[in-house]
Image: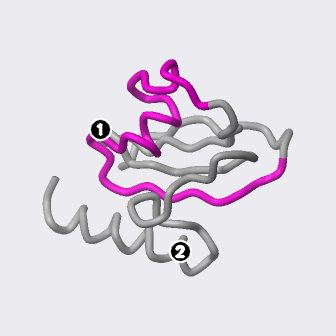
Amino acid sequence: MNNLTLYKLIQWRKRLERKGWYNASRFPVPSKGWIEYHAVWQGKLMSGRCPVTGMSDEWMEPGTPGYLLLRMQDVIEAVWRPTRIGVPVRSCARWG
C-alpha cells in the first residue's frame, strides 16, 4: 500500500470519527448490544451490523466481525458505532 492510499484511509477514518464513530484501535468494542462497523482488511472495505453479545471462538475466523474488530490482524483502519437491532447488514465492497 502506498503512502497516498494510506493517507486517504486515515482521512476517511477521521471523517467518520468526526461524525461520531469510534476508532477500533483506540476504543474497544462494547460487550453487549449491536454495532455497525467498517474495516479495511486485505484491500477490501468490510461493513456490517451485528450483535456483539456472546462473541465466541467462532467469531475469530478470518473476515468475521470479531476477527476484524477484536483481533485486528491485517486491518489497516476500522471504526464502529452503536446501532439499533434489526437494521439490515450492508454488503462488502472493494476499496478502489
Residue at x-position 59% and y-position 31%: 55
Q: Is residue 77 magenta?
A: yes
Left or right of 82, for residue 3: left
Q: Position of residue 15 (x, y in %)?
A: 50, 76
For mark 1, what is the residue? 42
- Residue type at mark 2: give it: Glu
Front residue (pair 17, 3): 17
Q: Secondary structure at mark 1?
A: loop
What is the C-alpha distance between the residues marked 2 and 1?
22 Å
Residue at x-position 38% and y-position 25%: 62
Residue 2 sits above or below residue 65 on the image:
below
> Where does the magenta region start and end?
55-84
- Residue type at mark 1: give it: Gln
Mark 1 surroundings: few (<14), some (14-19) or many (≥20) residues within 10 A: some
Residue at x-position 46% and y-position 58%: 24
Left or right of 10, for residue 70: right
Front residue (pair 21, 12): 21
For mark 2, what is the residue? 17
- Which numbered disc covers residue 64? none
Q: Place residue 26 in its image quadrant.
A: bottom left
Mark 2 surroundings: few (<14), some (14-19) or many (≥20) residues within 10 A: some
- Residue at the extreme left of the image, as rendered: 2
Mark before the other along the chain sequence, 2 or 1: 2
